[in-house]
Amino acid sequence: AQSVTQLGSHVSVSEGALVLLRCNYSSSVPPYLFWYVQYPNQGLQLLLKYTTGATLVKGINGFEAEFKKSETSFHLTKPSAHMSDAAEYFCAVSASGGYNKLIFGAGTRLAVHP
Amino acid sequence: DAGVIQSPRHEVTEMGQEVTLRCKPISGHNSLFWYRQTMMRGLELLIYFNNNVPIDDSGMPEDRFSAKMPNASFSTLKIQPSEPRDSAVYFCASNAGTGYGYTFGSGTRLTVV
């Protein structure tokens, strides 16, 4: 069965600093991997996804993530944090068995301070 | 495209009352998912449909919860009777196929007093 582990429920960075949010997954089949962002009082919004092909994927708002099969990881990064990046971030992996179901991690709340 | 549309945006009801949450998925999406989000339990999958057919309702917490999808453009989540512990944000999401990811609605914030 698929599962997702997000290391660190809370991450705090200074404005302009590197953002690194960690995600490890387990999957018995080649995974599709996703990162979502949730701003306060809003729904989840797709940041980026990996399905096949290039292992470094770029998303919206300057975020990117790299699929590393050997490490079963899909960490999210951004070179320079902005105050507007403060939100909760969810990593997700596609479940086997079809029907398009995703398995979500518990989320990481990112705080950005001046 | 207007995205996934949920209504109402906020709902306050008294314990014991029936509550119906509504969702209109994106046209052409063949899967629909209902989630509940709370501070304590995070994001929980309640039920999902594929081509209007319920596939897995194992996340529905109790028989007080029921969901329907009478056609490809409409789904409801009903709680009867409601209880204070049902207070949460309920999200609907739809999906066009494996690898596309979900599109979430803005959610319904339910408060049961």
Image (cartoon, coloured by chain):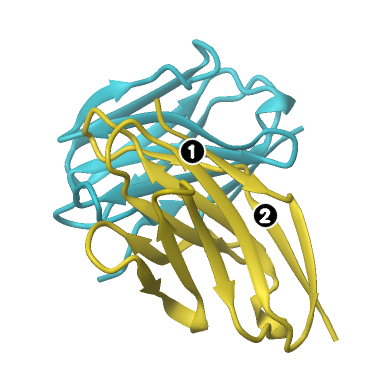
Chain colours: A yellow, B cyan
Q: Position of residue A59 (x, y in %)?
A: 41, 75
Q: Position of residue B72 (x, y in %)?
A: 17, 42
* Outermost residue to the right: A114
State which quarter of the image contains the N terminus of chain B: bottom left
- Mark 2 secondary-structure assignment: strand
Identify the residue position indicated by label 1 in the image. Answer: B35
In this rendering, is residue B72 above or below B100?
A: above
Residue A108 numbered mark, or none: 2
Q: In front: A91, or A31?
A: A31
Q: Is residue B105 visible?
A: no
Query: Subunit of mark 1?
Result: B
The answer to whether residue B74 is left or right of residue B103 is left
In this rendering, is residue A64 above or below B62?
A: below
Residue drawn at x 32%, y 54% as measured from the top left: B101
Q: In front: B34, or A23?
A: A23
Residue drawn at x 26%, y 23% as measured from the top left: B55
Residue drawn at x 79%, y 74% as measured from the top left: A13
* Outermost residue to the top: B63
Q: Pointer 1: residues within 10 angstroms few (<14), some, or many (20+)? A: many
Q: In front: B2, or A25?
A: A25
Q: In front: B8, or B107?
A: B107
The answer to whether residue B111 is left or right of residue A54 is right
Q: Pointer 2: residues within 10 angstroms few (<14), some, or many (20+)? A: many
- Mark 1 secondary-structure assignment: strand
Mark 1 and mark 2: span between their CA atoms?
A: 18 Å
